[in-house]
Amino acid sequence: MNQHKIKFILLICLALVTSVAYAGPEAKMKSEAYLPNDPNKKKAGEECKSSDECQKHHECKSDGEKNVCTEPPRSKLPPGVVT
């Protein structure tokens, strides 16, 4: 009877560890989801006066003599990641 309890507990632990390992990358991908562009707002590279004119995730920054909408920098991948 004791062996059955130990096997059952080990099986439950294995299932929990497997589900956590499987859900981790999927949750990270959802946090980096694509944000749809608003057709009424300016895209990256277009002239602007304030960040309100640009897409939700863009900023209006000076590019020499004029202000343009710029995208935020992409996150860097850790070393060894294969894309």
Image (tube, rainbow, N blue to C red):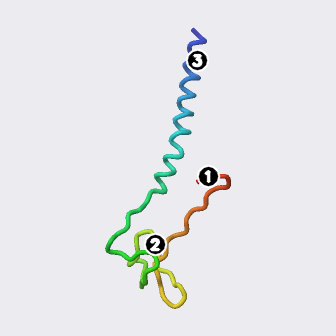
Q: Quadrant of the N terminus?
A: top right
Q: Amino acid at mark 1?
A: Val
- Residue beneath the point at 56% across and 21% down: 9
Q: Position of residue 82 (x, y in %)?
A: 62, 52
**Which residue is more in the foreground, 4 or 75?**
75
Q: Amino acid at mark 3?
A: Lys
Q: Position of residue 51 (x, y in %)?
A: 43, 78
Q: Earlier in the sequence, mark 3 or mark 2?
A: 3
- The answer to whether 64 is drawn above or below residue 53 in the figure is below
Q: Earlier in the sequence, mark 1 or mark 3?
A: 3
Q: Position of residue 65 (x, y in %)?
A: 52, 91
Q: Amino acid at mark 2?
A: His
Q: Tell me the CA gap for discs 1 and 3.
A: 37 Å
Mark whose residue sits in front, 2 or 1: 1
- Residue beneath the point at 43% across and 59% down: 34
**Which residue is more in the foreground, 31 or 46?**
46
The residue under label 3 is 7
Labels 3 & 2 near each other (Cβ < 8 A): no
Label 3 sits on a secondary structure element that is helix
Q: Quadrant of the C terminus?
A: bottom right
- Kindly indicate the quadrant of the structure image that contains residue 3: top right
Q: Tell me the CA gap for discs 2 and 1.
A: 28 Å
The residue under label 2 is 58
Residue at the far bottom: name it: 65
Mark whose residue sits in front, 1 or 3: 1
Q: Tell me the CA gap for discs 3 and 2.
A: 54 Å
The residue under label 1 is 82
